[in-house]
Image (cartoon, helix red, strand yellow):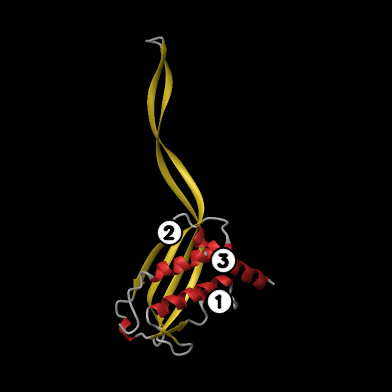
Amino acid sequence: MLRPVRLVACALLAAATLGLSACATAPLVRTDYDPTADFAQYRTWGFYQPVAMEQAGYSSWISERVREDVRHEMEARGYRYAAEGADLLVNFQGVIEDKTAVWQMPRSDVEWFYSYRHRSYVAVPVWYDETQVRQYRQGTLTVDLVDGKRNRMVWTGSANAPLTPGGKPEQRLAGIDRTVAGIFAKYPHRAGN
């Protein structure tokens, strides 16, 4: 009976992960690639089976939106979709992590001491570091391109940013669109180039 609860938890995790739209700052995008890969040979693309975000056995509105955005980005780069035998397979995954940020803030203050010599109070400046701690959640969306013949990842891009609670569904959808576009903005290749 644990399985349905786990499936719901995975769906909520995916929904929150792609809530990057509610971020106050733009997501940080990082990419990496296989230097031995020949990107000029790739002309078609499809989805890896099963897509990591849908390993629970079902799709969600979030995974469907990511699929639409990936389709748009791949076709804009000249790749043709092929359901079977594609040159490149696209996989994507969302993860949420609880994070803690700790930093020091320099502070100054004035301490008052009684001086028996001067028979009055004397102000003495004091400098110190105040420790600040903040708990937050960070969402990461990763998109992998896999060589279909060798079943080997040839390019990966990830976007991560702190998540903020709330936000309208339209804002979350727009955030998903921006996040996927931000990841693919760092993909330098085109079909057959």
Residue name at image x 35 percent, y 69 percent: 186
Residue name at image x 55 percent, y 64 percent: 170
Mark 2 or mark 3: which comes first in sequence?
3
Mark 3 sits on what residue? 15
**Disc 3 marks which amino acid?**
Ala
Residue 95 percent location from the top left of the image: 51, 66
Residue 85 percent location from the top left of the image: 44, 90
Q: Work out whether 117 lies above or below 160.
A: above
**Disc 2 marks which amino acid?**
Ala
Residue 190 visible in rendering: yes
- Distance from label 3 to label 1 (Cα)? 15 Å
Quadrant containing the C terminus is bottom left
Q: Work out whether 164 lies above or below 65.
A: above
**Mark 2 or 3: the one toward you:** 2
- Distance from label 1 to label 2 (Cα)? 28 Å
- Front-most of 103 and 12? 12
* Tag 3 secondary structure: helix
Mark 1 sits on what residue? 55
Mark 1 or mark 2: which comes first in sequence?
2
Farthest-out residue, bottom:
85
**Mark 1 or 2: the one toward you:** 2
Image check: 153 left or right of 6?
left
Figure quadrant of residue 184? bottom left
Residue name at image x 50 percent, y 68 percent: 94
Image check: 33 left or right of 49?
left
Mark 3 or mark 1: which comes first in sequence?
3
Mark 2 sits on what residue? 26
Residue 103 percent location from the top left of the image: 42, 45
Residue name at image x 45 percent, y 66 percent: 179
**Disc 1 marks which amino acid?**
Gln
* Tag 2 secondary structure: loop
